[in-house]
Every structure is written in structure tokens, then in C-alpha cells.
Amino acid sequence: MTNDTRHPTYERVYEVVRAIPAGRVATYGQVASIVGHCTARMVGYALAALPDAYADVPWQRVINAQGKVSPRAHSASTALQRELLEEDGVSFSKEDKVDFGRVRWAGPTTEWLLAHGFDPAPSWREK
DNA sequence: TGCGTGACTGCCT
DNA sequence: CAGGCAGCCACGC
């Protein structure tokens, strides 16, 4: 990667989301913590602006802290997200919430963080 | 060329 | 215990 051009925040967000394995989910805040110098809303912004060219980004695996798919302007997108997650093997309760205790992503490994140029800050893992 | 807007979360009162 | 506010990038009109 070019070192003279730092990856924009959105690009870093996509990078982290790509690391989420199928059958696992992460929250906006969790992704933000991993990216660093980034807020949960920023992650939401990044995913909302996700270009079609980034089809390899499993955006459906990012949900809100309540364990539910975040409602938005285009409800069809919300339904699609849930559908894609179920295909990943993620089940929802009758309250439309996922079981964090079972599908919560543990996060990337320290070597992954280093290999991708992220700060291996342990703060988000201790939590 | 400037402003509004868009997939959120945690702390404080 | 619940509601409110601050945080802050990129893109389109």
C-alpha cells in the first residue's frame, strides 16, 4: 500500500468489516474502536456510503449495540441485512435481536492489526 | 464553493 | 431509570 496516502477513514472501516467472518457480527462501536480515531456514527456513515464496487465488504455483519439491525430510511435494506445474516447462520430472537453471547465477533488478532496497519490497542479487547 | 445529511454510542443529568 | 447531547468523514446539490 502507498504510504504517502493514508487510507481515508471510510477505507479503514471497510478493511475491518472485511475481517468479520461469516456467522459472526460486530457492533458499530466495536468496529469504530478497532479502526481508532473513529466514532460509531462514522462507521454508520461509512457503510451508508458503501460503493457498489466494495461488494466484498460484509456490511450485514455490522449491527447496533442493541443486537438489532439498525432501522433506516430504506426499510428494504434492513430486511435484506437480516436475510443475509440468517444465510450466514445467525439466528434472531422473536424480538429481532441476535444472541451476542453466541455470535459476537471476538475481533481481529494482534497480527492482523499489525499486518493491516492498525493500532493493536488492547483497550477494546479488555472490554 | 458551502452546507446538509446519513447504518450510532456512551456518558452525564 | 430514562432522556438528551456531543462526537465528526465523505459526498452530492
Image: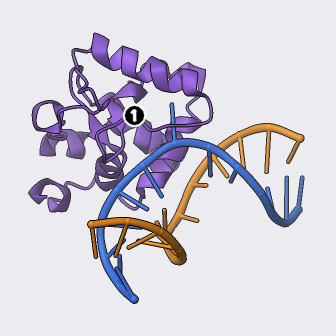
Chain colours: A purple, B blue, C orange
Asked if residue B8 lies left or right of residue A48, the reply is left
Q: Quadrant of residue A25?
A: top left
Asked if residue B5 lies left or right of residue A45, the reply is right
Whole-percent x, y for residue A41 in the image? 48, 53
Residue plotted at (19% across, 39% down): A108
Asked if residue A87 lies left or right of residue A123, the reply is right
- Relative to residue A39, is residue A47 depicted above or below? above
Label 1 sits on residue: A69
- Residue A6 makes an appearance in the image: no
- Relative to residue C8, is residue A76 depicted above or below? above
Query: How many numbered marks are there?
Result: 1
Amino acid found under the numbered disc labelled 1: Val
Kind of element beneath mark 1: loop
Circle 1: is it few (<14), some (14-19), or many (20+) Cα within 10 Å?
A: many
Whole-percent x, y for residue A65 in the image? 31, 48
- Residue A110 makes an appearance in the image: yes
Residue plotted at (23% across, 20% down): A90
